[in-house]
Each structure stands twice: as structure tokens, then as C-alpha cells.
């Protein structure tokens, strides 16, 4: 379960990204965080991934106070999350297979078991045939799917995606949405931020609408 | 344990791949490290070679030649006086008869000496000073020269004393230079690691966000630093070995002029291993400092 308790975030230059935000997301939810650009969606997700600390309030993920995590515990906390970054953050000097392999290498998985998992993740997002391709050779939609494969290869209980449909055409966005729905259906808690009010709107079990860092719904 | 070893093996593989991926940078870095290390290593080789000269020749001696008209009684008195003189370790008398007999045994001189109307050699003393300092010996020689019946005073092997003094100074300079070059090596590796961290910024940040520990991210960099130090040490060895081969004959020729034997040889195994170990350690240190400055303070590390 994810719980934000009266969380505010003020960046050093004085901009309030989030103000007095209190939300709860249950295990197994498909949560959509919506709002215009600059509404605070990315900041909210960054607090869950421990990329940002709240200025005020607490963020609890499965009972763990994320803001109070020690440096030494941070990597192990992040290994339990699946993160799809807004800019994907793929490594362009290695193949699709090696990109997906990275989280398993970090976790110290035995290579044979890891290879099986990578192939399964690539298969799940429809990229098994492109395993040897370099990210630069993939289309925008394929790159997004590759980022999702990398996020889920560790089989996380919580999958977080920051604007995964941005810069994608409607058809590709639907394909991507379907991948999240599939993960949600097998019990993964999915949290997706989007500027598009229609993206995953029908399937969402939890909706968080933000405007200038405040909860509007 | 296997997983831990596999992690280190992977990191070593990544490190080697990074070094090979930028061959020009790698070669230039290794050359810079090699040149920096070749100075202390070369110094060790030179000192080992000159140690033979400094050690083989005993303390310098002073030869005191008497005038030809010095009588036997004067010689005895002189010997006694020399033995009582402060700063004199031992005195050996070479009578003019002994010298004549010795010279006559020399094939080329025998006929010449026989043709002479009288013994041309003076009585002489070989004085061994108790001290090794060049200044004290020169002072003693000057004092002996003022004594009555003394015709000529000569300091033998004074150059060994000067050589010893120069070697002592050289050793001090070499130690200071080695320390400075050690800092230089750390600076080279620091700069090289910093460049790598900046070049791999995206990969490092992604790894941190995917749950990589500092140790996991640092490991390949540390291996790169260690390898740079180690390979730089090998480059230094090659430089010194090449110079040693080139200098062997000229050094031997020079030594012959001083009637000593100098053998300049390749760095021995202890010197080689010491330089390699120190270079590897300094590589590791340079990398660690760079990682503390530029990696462990990363924005995603909080």
C-alpha cells in the first residue's frame, strides 16, 4: 500500500510542486495520476521512487517511510519497484537484451536464470524478436515497451510509470496501456501518470487528479 | 561466495572493456603513468649499480711521499708521528727498497730501473684516515704536506667519497621525487576516473535508480584504476629495461676509466613487484578519491 500523509514538496528555487497531499493506493490498484504539465505528477512519483524527499509529511510504501530511508537501504528498496521513466533512460550503447538484463545483474541473479527472465520480459512486451537490436534501432513505441520490460523483469509488486504514453501515437499508446492492464490483472500494483485524461481511464481503480500540486479529485 | 566472485569477475570484464573501448586515451594514460613511475624505478636500478662502486672501494687513502734525502731515523720518527696523529686509522710504510723491488718485478720497468744509477723511489706511507668525509681528508692531506721531509701528498680514491656523498643526496632527491610522482600518478588516475564518471553519467544514474549499490557501481571504476596502475607499472618496467640495455655499454666504458666495475642490470624481482604493487595501490587510491568526489555525491544517491 502507498500512503501520502499531508505531503508537501518545495523545490530549492521556491516552487511548490505538491501542497498538503494525502492519498492512499491499495495493493493491486491501477492508479492513474492525471493533471496538466507542471501539476506535480512526476514529483509525486519521484517521492515513491525516493528520487525526491518530501519537504513536509510522510510517504509510506508497504509501511516503509521512504523519506527516512538510509543511504545504505535505498538501493534495496528500489529493487522492489518497477520504474518506467518519463524519458525512458535506456542505455543506447547496449542491446535491448542487455538493457533488460541490467536490473538482474544489479540484483546479482545467476546468469542462466537471468537470461530466462529477460527473454520472458521481452516476450511479454512483444520484443523478443528484437532482443539483439540496439535501442536506437527501435521505434518510439518499441523503446517504451523495452523500458517496461526492464521495469518488470525483477517481477516487482509495484510498477510505476511516468507519462508512458507521451510522444506516442494513439494506436501505440493503446498497446502500451494494454501492457499495464495485463500486469494489473496478475496482481501488480500499477501507478501511471498521464496528461491524457483518456489513457487507462476505463480500467483505473484509483484516480488522482492534481492541479498546481493540489489534489482536485 | 560464487555470486560475489561472479560480481567481481563481471566488474573486471567491464573494466577491461572500458579500457579497450578508448585505446588512445588508455595508451596515453598508461604512458603518462609509466613515465612517472620509470623515474623511481630507474633510480633504484642506478643506485643498485653504483652501490658496487661505493661499497667495493674502501675508505680513501692518503699517500705521503718523503724527500729522497730522508734518512732511516727520520722515517721511523715520521711513522711514529703519523700513528699518533688524530684522525689516522692506520699507517703502512713502503720503504724505497720495497718499492724498487716491486717495480723491478714489473716486466716493462725492470730494464729501465736496472739502468738507473740509484734508487729513484722515495720512502712512502699509506695513511688510512678514520673518517670518510672528503673535507676532513683534504684537510688532513694539507696538514701532512706541511710536515718536514714530506715531498708530496696524494689523496687516493677521493672520488669514491664524493660519489658516496652524491649518492646520499641522490637518494634523498629520489625519495622526494618518488613521493611527488606518486601524487602525480594519483592525480592522473583521479582525472581519468572523473572523465569516465562524467562520460557514463547516464548509465550510473540509471543503475542507481534500478537499485545498484555504490559498491556495485564503483567496482568497475576501481578495477580500471587498479589496471591502469598495474599496466602503467609494466610500461615503466619496459622503459627502464630499454634504457638499461642502452646504457649498459656506455656505463661499463665510463667505469673502466675509473678502474672499477659497474654492472647495470634489469630491475630485480623485488623492485619490480614493489613498483607494480605501489602503482596498483595508487591507482586504486586515485579512483577512490575521484569516486568520493563525483559518484557517491550523485543526485540520486541522496
Image (cartoon, rainbow, N blue to C red):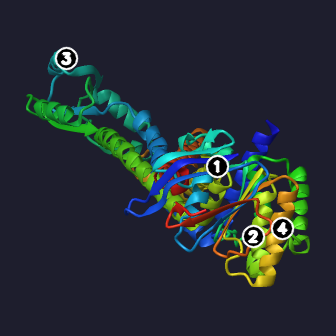
As rendered, which of A202 and B238 lies closer to the eye?
A202
- Residue A68 vs B250, above or below: the answer is above
Q: Which residue is mark 2?
A: A201
Callouts 4 and 2 in the same chain: yes
Q: CA distance from mark 4 to mark 2?
A: 14 Å
Among numbered discs 4 and 2, the one appearing first in the sequence: 4
As rendered, which of B50 and B160 lies closer to the eye?
B50
Residue count near mark 3 (Cα–Cα under 10 Å), binned few <14, some 14–19, many ≥20: few
Mark whose residue sits in front, 4 or 3: 4
Locate residue A47: give its quadrant. Answer: bottom right
Q: Which residue is mark 4?
A: A179
The chain letter under disc 2 is A
Q: Which residue is mark 3?
A: B76
The chain letter under disc 1 is B
Measuring from the top left, give residue A198's x and y in whole percent.
73, 76
Which numbered tag is attached to residue B93? Answer: none
Q: Which residue is mark 1?
A: B219
**Which quarter of the figure is the N terminus of chain A placed in?**
top right
- Residue B218 vs A205, above or below: the answer is above
Callouts 2 and 1 in the same chain: no
Among numbered discs 3 and 1, the one appearing first in the sequence: 3
- Seen at 23% across and 38% down, the residue is B154
Amino acid at each position: 500500500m502507498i500512503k501520502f500523509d499531508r505531503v508537501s514538496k518545495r523545490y530549492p528555487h521556491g516552487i511548490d510542486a505538491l501542497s498538503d497531499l494525502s492519498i492512499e493506493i491499495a495493493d493491486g490498484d491501477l492508479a492513474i495520476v492525471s493533471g496538466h504539465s507542471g501539476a506535480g505528477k512526476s514529483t509525486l512519483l519521484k517521492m515513491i521512487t525516493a528520487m525526491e524527499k518530501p519537504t513536509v509529511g510522510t510517504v509510506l510504501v508497504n509501511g516503509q517511510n521512504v523519506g527516512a530511508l538510509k543511504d545504505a537501504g535505498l538501493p534495496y528498496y528500489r529493487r522492489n519497484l518497477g520504474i518506467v521513466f518519463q524519458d525512458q533512460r535506456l542505455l543506447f550503447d547496449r542491446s535491448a537484451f542487455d538493457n533488460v538484463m541490467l536490473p538482474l545483474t544489479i540484483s546479482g541473479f545467476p546468469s542462466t536464470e537471468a537470461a530466462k527472465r529477460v527473454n520472458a520480459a521481452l516476450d511479454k512486451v512483444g520484443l523478443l524478436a528484437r532482443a539483439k537490436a540496439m535501442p536506437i534501432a527501435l521505434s518510439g513505441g518499441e523503446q517504451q515497451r523495452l523500458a517496461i520490460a526492464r521495469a518488470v523483469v525483477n517481477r516487482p509488486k509495484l510498477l510505476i510509470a511516468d507519462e508512458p504514453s507521451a510522444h506516442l501515437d494513439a494506436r501505440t499508446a493503446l498497446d502500451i496501456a494494454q501492457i499495464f492492464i495485463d500486469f494489473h490483472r496478475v496482481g501488480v500494483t500499477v501507478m501511471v501518470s498521464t496528461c491524457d485524461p483518456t489513457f487507462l481511464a476505463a480500467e483505473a481503480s484509483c484516480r488522482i487528479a492534481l492541479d498546481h500540486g493540489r489534489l482536485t479529485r | 561466495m560464487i555470486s560475489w566472485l561472479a560480481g567481481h569477475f563481471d566488474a573486471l570484464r567491464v573494466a577491461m572493456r572500458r579500457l579497450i573501448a578508448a585505446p588512445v586515451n588508455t595508451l596515453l594514460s598508461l604512458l603518462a603513468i609509466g613515465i612517472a613511475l620509470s623515474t623511481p624505478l630507474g633510480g633504484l636500478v642506478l643506485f643498485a649499480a653504483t652501490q658496487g662502486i661505493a661499497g667495493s672501494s674502501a675508505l680513501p687513502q692518503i699517500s705521503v711521499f718523503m724527500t729522497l734525502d730522508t734518512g732511516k731515523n727520520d722515517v721511523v720518527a715520521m711513522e711514529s708521528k703519523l700513528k699518533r696523529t688524530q684522525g689516522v686509522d692506520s699507517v703502512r710504510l713502503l720503504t724505497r727498497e720495497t718499492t724498487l723491488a716491486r717495480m723491478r718485478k714489473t716486466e716493462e720497468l725492470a730494464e729501465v730501473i736496472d739502468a738507473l744509477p740509484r734508487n729513484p723511489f722515495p720512502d712512502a706511507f699509506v695513511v688510512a684516515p678514520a673518517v670518510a668525509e672528503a673535507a676532513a681528508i683534504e684537510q688532513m692531506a694539507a696538514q701532512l704536506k706541511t710536515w718536514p721531509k714530506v715531498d708530496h701528498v696524494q689523496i687516493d680514491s677521493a672520488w669514491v667519497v664524493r660519489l658516496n656523498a652524491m649518492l646520499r643526496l641522490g637518494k634523498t632527491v629520489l625519495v622526494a621525487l618518488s613521493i611527488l610522482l606518486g601524487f602525480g600518478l594519483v592525480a592522473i588516475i583521479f582525472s581519468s576516473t572523473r572523465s569516465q564518471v562524467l562520460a557514463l553519467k547516464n548509465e550510473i544514474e540509471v543503475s542507481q535508480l534500478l537499485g545498484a549499490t555504490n559498491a556495485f557501481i564503483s567496482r568497475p571504476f576501481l578495477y580500471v584504476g587498479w589496471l591502469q596502475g598495474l599496466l602503467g607499472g609494466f610500461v615503466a618496467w619496459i622503459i627502464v629495461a630499454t634504457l638499461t640495455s642502452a646504457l649498459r655499454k656506455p656505463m661499463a666504458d665510463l667505469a673502466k676509466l675509473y678502474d672499477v666495475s659497474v654492472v647495470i642490470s634489469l630491475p630485480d624481482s623485488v623492485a619490480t613487484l614493489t613498483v607494480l604493487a605501489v602503482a596498483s595501490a595508487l591507482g586504486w587510491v586515485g579512483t577512490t578519491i575521484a569516486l568520493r568526489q563525483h559518484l557517491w555525491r550523485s543526485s540520486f544517491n541522496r
